[in-house]
Image: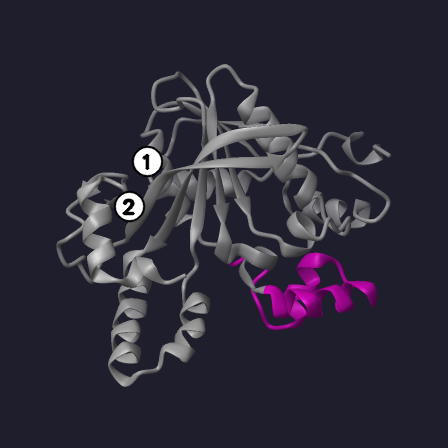
């Protein structure tokens, strides 16, 4: 499970071109050099052929795993200490120390004009459990269908550290109880003393710079603030593509709160059964 921490495996992956390092503008760096303390750098593992069943049919994609160099460095230091002290049984704590984001590449987006892109925030309840309290699960499945079926191809970036708009699963569970008591999804965050939205899209921007560059692309989103965040990181040629799906009686109030917070919905979008 932790072989990527083994220095010998790391060297082997670098030699075969499967372990890369990029900066915040997607430029490749020397993966063997000590990363600078200031500035964002990401480590990328891939491509890894991955047969998936998301959406309407099975398909094959190329998977890349991504983690910040700072987080990986801390974990590697801790792993070395644990190995020296014989603490192998404690290695399970390492998995919770990093937010490992994923990129699913479909087609050849680096070679085509205006690839289709989705930056998807992790949602255990929606993506895995199929909860209808949000529309995240249908958005994920529909995004894969749309990207895989698009002539230009594209990619889906799955942001692991974005649960509950960045507050984490434990706090998200508490907000559900507050919502059941009458608060909307944004009020519930504030009641816990947390930001309405604390997501950081700098990692997503770096990955888009690497896989697409500052070329025109289409982004599946209803959230104009996501466009603003990506533009702040130098991605200015993005066309938003409406991505409304999975509306139900369970989540209509939740989606109305998102609309009131600025998400773009047409007047009849939330009337779907």
* Above or below: residue 224 compared with residue 152: below
Closer to the camera, 71 or 89?
A: 89
Mark 2 lies on a secondary structure that is loop
Instruction: Decide: few, some or many residues near mark 1? Use Cα within 10 Å; few <14, some 14-19, many ≥20.
Output: many
Q: Are marks 1 and 2 in contact (CB under 8 Å)?
A: yes
Left or right: residue 190 compared with residue 50: right
**Residue pictured at 43% horizontal, 59% vertical:** 99
At label 2, counting other C-alpha atoms closer than 10 Å, the crowd grade (few under 14, some 14-19, many 20 or more) is many
Pick the residue in front: 109 or 53. Answer: 53
Q: Which corner quadrant holds the C terminus?
A: top right
Residue 245 in percent (x, y) is at 72, 34
Q: Which residue is mark 1?
A: 209
Label 1's element? helix
Mark 2, residue position: 24
Q: Earlier in the sequence, mark 1 or mark 2?
A: 2
- What segment is highlighted magenta in the picture? 169-198
| Residue 140: x %, y % from top left | 62, 39
Q: Quadrant of residue 193?
A: bottom right
Q: Is residue 160 visible?
A: yes
Residue 256 figure quarter: top right
User: Tag count in the figure?
Assistant: 2
Disc 1 versus disc 2: distance between alpha carbons?
8 Å
What secondary structure prevails in the magenta region? helix
């Amino acid at each position: 499970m932790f072989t990527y921490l083994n220095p010998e495996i790391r060297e082997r992956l670098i030699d075969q071109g499967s372990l890369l390092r990029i900066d915040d503008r997607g430029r490749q760096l020397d993966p063997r050099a000590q990363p600078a303390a200031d500035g964002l750098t990401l480590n990328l593992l891939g491509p890894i052929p991955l047969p998936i069943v998301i959406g309407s049919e099975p398909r094959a994609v190329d998977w890349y795993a991504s983690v910040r160099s700072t987080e990986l460095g801390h974990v590697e230091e801790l792993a070395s200490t644990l190995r020296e002290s014989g603490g192998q049984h404690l290695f399970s704590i390492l998995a919770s120390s990093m937010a490992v984001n994923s990129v699913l590449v479909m087609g050849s987006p680096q070679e085509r004009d205006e690839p289709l892109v989705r930056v998807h925030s992790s949602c255990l309840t929606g993506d895995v459990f199929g909860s209808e309290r949000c529309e995240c699960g249908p958005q994920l499945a529909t995004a894969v269908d749309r990207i895989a079926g698009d002539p230009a191809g594209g990619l889906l970036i799955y942001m692991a550290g974005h649960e509950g708009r960045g507050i984490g699963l434990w706090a998200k569970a508490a907000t559900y109880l507050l919502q059941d008591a009458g608060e909307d999804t944004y009020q519930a965050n504030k009641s816990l003393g947390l930001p309405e939205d604390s997501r950081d899209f700098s990692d997503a921007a770096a990955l888009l710079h690497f896989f697409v560059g500052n070329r025109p692309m289409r982004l599946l989103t209803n959230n104009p603030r996501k466009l603003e965040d990506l533009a702040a990181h130098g991605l200015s040629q993005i066309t938003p593509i409406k991505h409304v799906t999975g509306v139900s009686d369970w989540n209509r109030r939740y989606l109305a709160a998102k609309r009131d917070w600025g998400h773009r919905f047409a007047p009849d979008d939330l009337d779907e059964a």
